[in-house]
Amino acid sequence: YNEMKKKPRNIAIGVILNTKKDKILMIERSKKKGLIFPKGGCDSDEWPLAGISALRETWEESGVICKIEKKLFNKLDLNGYSLSKIDKNHSFSVYQMLVIEMKDNWPECEKRGNCRFWLTYKEAK
């Protein structure tokens, strides 16, 4: 178990914008209180194409079908996120996405209490 826990992960994150590009979609965390962007580990067959993972995780966690507009940043450009909270060996890829369609049912809707929120940039900070 300890060996598995220490293994570096490749993590893909989706920052989803509405069609007006004035709001960001955030979802309820599954285990703790709070809101997060849809994110998750890249499957071995998806890396180094982390965008595929970001699209998959966005669908599974938020029920939103998106298209990727651009890659925002990689690993160490975390905008103040504390690296003490994460393993420094992890790799991050963050993508700006535009919503195409929101579904009423998705793989993790029950797990997350069916909670997703459109927030202004100021509210999301």
Image (cartoon, grey):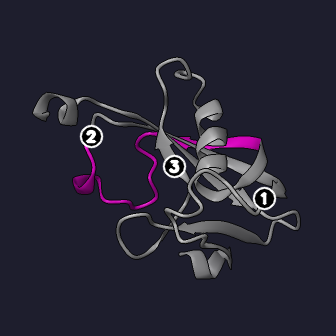
Mark 2–mark 1 distance (CA, rounded to whole Å): 35 Å
Q: Position of residue 24 (x, y in %)?
A: 69, 67
Give residue 39's mark. 3
What is the spatial separation of the Cα atoms under label 2 and label 3, in whole angstroms?
17 Å
In the depicted view, which residue is nearer to us: 98 or 121? 98
Depicted 77 relative to depicted 7: above or below: below
First of labels 2, 3 by sequence position: 3
Q: Is residue 124 left or right of residue 3?
A: right
**Residue denoted by label 1:** 103
Q: Nearer the viewer, residue 14 or 102?
A: 102
What's the residue at 60%, 82% (across, down)?
A: 123
- The magenta segment: 68-88
Tell me the number on the disc at residue 88. Answer: 2
Label 2 or label 1, whichever lies nearer to me, is 1
Going by the numbered disc 2, the residue's amino acid type is: Lys
Q: Is 75 in the magenta?
A: yes
Give percent across and percent down for residue 118. 70, 74
In which image quadrant can residue 27 be found? Answer: bottom right
Q: Residues within 10 Å of mark 1 (few under 14, many from 20)?
A: few
Residue closer to the observer: 113 or 67: 113
**Taking 47 as reference, is 85 above or below it?**
below
- Residue 32, image x and y in percent? 35, 70
Residue lying farthest to the bottom in this orientation = 123
Amino acid type of disc 1?
Lys
Amino acid at circle 3: Lys
Q: Are marks 2 and 3 in contact (CB under 8 Å)?
A: no
From the image, which quarter does the N terminus lie in? Answer: top left
- Residue, x 80% and y 53% (percent of image)? 98
Answer above or below: position of 49 versus 76: above
- In the picture, measured across the screen, residue 111 lies left or right of residue 106, that is left
Could you tell me residue 49's position as x and y percent? 60, 24
Queried whether the magenta region covers residue 10, the answer comes back as no
